[in-house]
Image: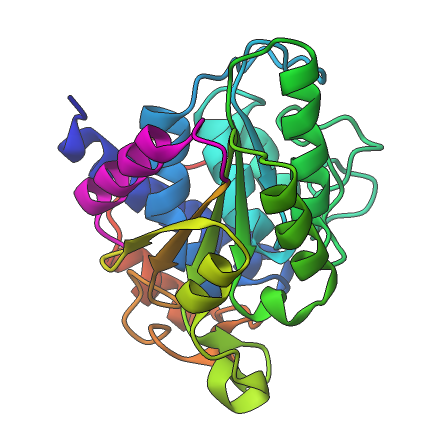
Amino acid sequence: MADIQHLTNLVSQVRRDIVRQVHAVNSGHPGGSLGCAEFLVALYNEIMVHDPSFNMDGKNEDLFFLSNGHISPVFYSVLARAGYFPVSELSTFRKLNTRLQGHPTTHEGLPGVRIASGSLGQGLSVAVGAAQAKKLNGDDKTIFTLHGDGELQEGQNWEAIMYAAAKKVDNLIATIDVNGQQIDGSTDHVLDMGSLKGKFEAFGWKVVTIEKGNDLASIIAGMQEAISLSRKQTPICILLHTEMGNGVDFMMGSHKWHGVAPNDEQLEAALAQNPSTLADY
């Protein structure tokens, strides 16, 4: 059974890591990162079978692919706090000649990162291939992915969605961060996508909806439901309803914090709302 208090404490620390990384270089994407903190903490600390010693092949491990790579601050924090690389390395975020670039890359060999995800819309295609490779290799572990809702405006996603259902890729669980915001405004305003549930179901996927996407218990229950539905000839989609900027009151619900760094005063306010539970880097 999950230790919700421990995970809650870790989420608070991850939020601190996010705002400090972005503030230090006055660059990055805090809004979506904060909104997905609970999900990635739960995924790496409760759901996935994974090994921080890191082997790129990932044999006999669950694998995770971050498709919306601009939320790298939360990804880096969760990886570091899970033991993939030293927490102190978070201080190198977005600096020249470091492994923690603004979008995850593979050429620097950062443990935990298996694909470069600077270009949106490509992660699901890679994940489908990885899922099929696991089947071919007799590996019974699962492929997990995360995508932005605005990212689904990229057409390549729908080719992969169609292919995964047609080829019965049923060891794949794709999570959509449904926060309703993207860089230029609300997703409804920029390009209304209608019912995501209806679209995925029409493409032959099973859909699990997590209405409280910033509640750890709800996330864990929803992920466990998705896992129970997998291996039954259809891929699984999770619609995770989150709040942009969750945990920092002046960032919450606003697309304006998609890619803007807090100033000194705003950083202190954000940190005050998220007490340190582990050592800051």
Above or below: residue 140 compared with residue 132: above
Horizontally, is 218 left or right of 80 in the view? Answer: left
Give the camera-side residue of 122 and 233: 233
Above or below: residue 162 compared with residue 150: above
For the question of whether residue 121 can be seen, the reply is: no
Q: Which is the main secondary structure of the residues drawn in magenta?
A: helix
Q: Where is residue 41 in the image (x, y as percent from the top left)?
A: 36, 37
- Dividing the picture into quadrants, the one containing residue 9 is top left
Q: Where is residue 19 in the image (x, y as percent from the top left)?
A: 46, 56
Q: Is residue 221 magenta?
A: yes
Horizontally, is 71 left or right of 41 in the view? Answer: right
For the question of whether residue 3 can be seen, the reply is: yes
Q: Report the residue at 62% width, 52% height from top.
A: 161
Numbered circles on residues, count = 0
Q: Outermost residue toward the bottom?
A: 189
Horizontally, is 175 left or right of 11 in the view? Answer: right
- Dividing the picture into quadrants, the one containing residue 196 is bottom left
Q: Report the residue at 65% width, 23% height from top.
A: 111
Q: Report the residue at 31% width, 26% height from top.
A: 46
Above or below: residue 254 compared with residue 212: below
Quick one: quadrant of the N terminus? Answer: top left
- Dividing the picture into quadrants, the one containing residue 17 is top left
Q: Is residue 186 magenta?
A: no
Per the rendered image, the range of residues in magenta is: 214-234
Q: Report the residue at 66% width, 60% height from top.
A: 158
Q: Where is residue 137 in the image (x, y as percent from the top left)?
A: 68, 10
Q: Position of residue 197 (x, y in %)?
A: 40, 64
Give the camera-side residue of 33 and 128: 128
